[in-house]
Amino acid sequence: MKIAIIGSGYVGLVTGACFSELGNKVICADNDARKINGLKKGLVPIYEPGLEELIVRNARNKRLFFTASIKEAVKSSEIIFIAVGTPPLENGEADLTGIENVAHSIAVNMKGYRLIVEKSTVPVETGDWVKHTITHYIKDKTKFDVASNPEFLREGSAIDDFMHPDRIVIGVESKKARDLLTELYRPFKVPLVITNIKSAELIKHASNAFLATKISFINAVSQICDKVGADVEEVARGMGLDKRIGPSFLKAGIGYGGSCFPKDLDAFVHISEKTGYDFKLLKSVAKVNIEQLSSVLKKIKDSLWIIKGKTIAILGLAFKPNTDDIRNAPALRLVRMLQEEGARIKLYDPQAINKARKVLDKVIFCADAYSTCRSADCLFIATEWDEFKELDFVKIKKLLRRPLIVDGRNLYDPEVLRKLGFSYISIGRKKV
Ligand code: NAD
């Protein structure tokens, strides 16, 4: 099938590369001409495992193309996915300017039937606005459909998630739209959930809000564990084996972050308010998330007494492992909070340093975990990258100024570190 993807970021590029891998002819568009020029030369602007190979292979096989012209993308494709960003406005509402601009551009460039699919995460009723916008700007009586097909991939495992999803959600309002999307997704042998557009839009916001709720729930439980000497890892395991609960997203830590959960939760609260419903539950989920990071800062303070003038070595900045994405990363906020208290920060992340340099001041960026630890007063673990699981702690003990580890991801066995002579503080587990 002939497909256009408008917005070539994490979601757009993965969607485009995967659809082309399945034999479709895909054109990825973006209004960032520099990004498109790079992509034409095989330069992938983000770190996502396996993405570069997939893009290079499909571009070479003439199934994947790039353009900075939305006109060109609209001209050559029957199905057009909108995958632009929907960032938060200051009040938490989703900024849908990009969606409106793209809908406008599609309308003025459309010649013949097009199916316009919302891939971006959008508040319920955005589909209606996309329809109004296209109807308003369209030049003649050209027919079109709008559909919603929310994306559930996770950065770091995006290709596998796209190719092997738990389910595919399609919100449609015509037989033609339903048939086109059913045909496009035919190679995927997973449940196809076909709904109307509004339900599909809501499925995405409700899913992300529910996952964030699980994280805040276990973080709240970790606070009790800290107070009474229980172990949150054991509690989570005991809960997670109950099939009604399930083990995923029950990992206590420094709180959720990234480009999706915080913004989608805020946008969901906002759109709920617009409908006249006060989603108090989700407001508490966001509050618990903010407080979790403050409690982590307190753990560092309680161990070091005075933060001013101390050097903190931080391992990890990306909001999760296997990505270079630092949008809304809790570690970024922690760095700023520590700097406000007068700490000197040394930092290492396997992939996110280039992005970190653009947004952080006065941080010493290091080339590896060991140089980060040299002469630091405390080692803080912020992201659970695999390479941090295999560190040589005998070496680290010699490098640190004092043997103190605050582990925001519960990566290590407390007993092992205690035996090595560390003071080891983690989340919701006994201090050693
Ligand atoms: P991103 O910022 O990585 O990419 C968005 C791209 O859209 C950028 O390249 C930008 O230049 C381009 N763009 C913006 N306005 C444009 C316009 N008017 N015309 C053409 N291009 C334009 O964002 P992302 O992480 O890929 O997210 C895109 C959407 O998908 C968001 O709504 C997000 O919530 C949703 N989503 C993201 C993820 C994720 O893990 N990143 C997962 C599921 C859903």
Image (cartoon, grey):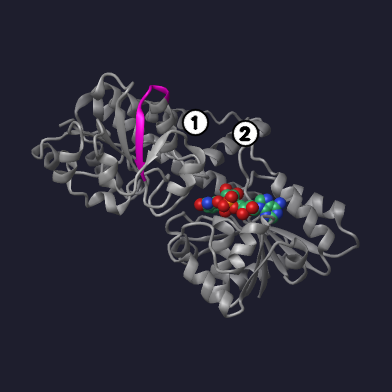
Taking depth in this image into account, of 279 and 287 the one nearest to the observer is 287
Quadrant showing the N terminus: bottom right
The residue that disc 1 covers is 281
Q: Residue furthest top?
A: 306
Please name the residue shown 33% across and 29% down the image. Answer: 296
Residue 162 position (above or below residue 1): above
- Would residue 112 appear left or right of 158 to someone viewing this image? right
Quadrant showing the C terminus: top left
Q: Is residue 228 magenta?
A: no
Please name the residue shown 47% across and 43% down the image. Answer: 357
Magenta-colored span: 340-348
- Would residue 296 appear left or right of 172 to someone viewing this image? left
Residue 377 position (above or below residue 197): above
Q: What is the x, y in percent for residue 431?
A: 18, 30
Residue 126 position (above or below residue 166): above
Mark in front: 2 vs 1? 2
Q: What is the x, y in percent for residue 113?
A: 80, 68
The residue that disc 2 covers is 270
Residue 400, located in which quarter of the rendered image? top left
Q: Residue furthest right?
A: 140
Instruction: Measure the alpha-carbon separation of dots 2 and 1.
Output: 13 Å
Which class describes the residues within 10 Å of circle 1: few (<14), some (14-19), or many (20+)?
A: few
Badge 2 residue CB within 8 Å of ligand 1: no
Please name the residue shown 8% across and 39% down the image. Answer: 419
Q: Residue furthest left?
A: 419
SS type, badge 2: helix
